[in-house]
Image: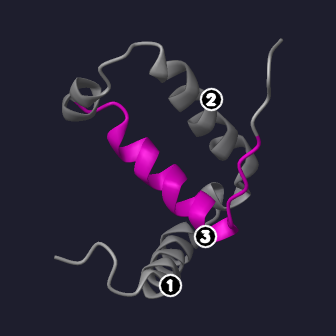
Amino acid sequence: MEISVKIELTDDQALVLSDWMSRVMHRAEFSAIVDDRAVWSALLKINGTLETQLSSIFDSSYADQLAAARQRLISELGEFGEQ
């Protein structure tokens, strides 16, 4: 029996995650930490889904939208992740 898992993200979360995945997934450093080749199946599925669902990645104001989304998410986190 196969189970389907649904993950809901806000627009801001989806936009920031999509940008991050596009930037890091093909770096050698990232590939080195993915120590299970099967995990790539899920990563590629997530990345592909984000890219096809987010029309804003083709918008001329993409950089501004991304920056605004990042700021909103960071402000929601409070001090979490600060060093």
Identify the image quadrant of the N terminus.
Answer: top right
Q: Residue at x 37, y 35 (%)?
A: 25
Please name which of the two marks, 1 or 2, marks the residue nearer to the observer: 1
The CA distance from mark 1 to mark 3 is 11 Å
Identify the image quadrant of the C terminus.
Answer: bottom left
Q: How busy is the neighbourhood of tag 3: few (under 14 within 10 Å), some, or many (20 plus)?
A: some
Q: Nearer the viewer, residue 63 or 51?
A: 51
Local SS, label 3: helix
Q: Is residue 21 magenta?
A: yes
Q: Residue at x 19, y 33 (%)?
A: 29
Which comes sooner in the sequence, label 2 or label 3?
3
Q: Amino acid at mark 2?
A: Lys
Q: What x and y, as percent, mark residue 16?
A: 50, 62
Q: How busy is the neighbourhood of tag 1: few (under 14 within 10 Å), some, or many (20 plus)?
A: few
Q: Amino acid at mark 3?
A: Asp
Q: Residue at x 26, y 33 (%)?
A: 27
Q: Which residues are magenta?
A: 6-27
Above or below for 33 versus 57: above
Residue 80 position by quadrant:
bottom left
The CA distance from mark 2 to mark 3 is 19 Å
Q: Is residue 4 left or right of residue 27?
A: right
Q: What x and y, as percent, mark residue 57?
A: 61, 56
Residue 71 position by quadrant:
bottom left
Residue lying farthest to the right in this orientation: 1
Q: Is residue 17 left or right of residue 10?
A: left
The CA distance from mark 1 to mark 2 is 27 Å
Above or below for 19 versus 40: below
- Give the labeled residue for mark 1: 76
- Give the labeled residue for mark 2: 45
Q: What x and y, as percent, mark residue 7?
A: 71, 48
Please name which of the two marks, 1 or 3, marks the residue nearer to the observer: 1
- Give the labeled residue for mark 3: 12
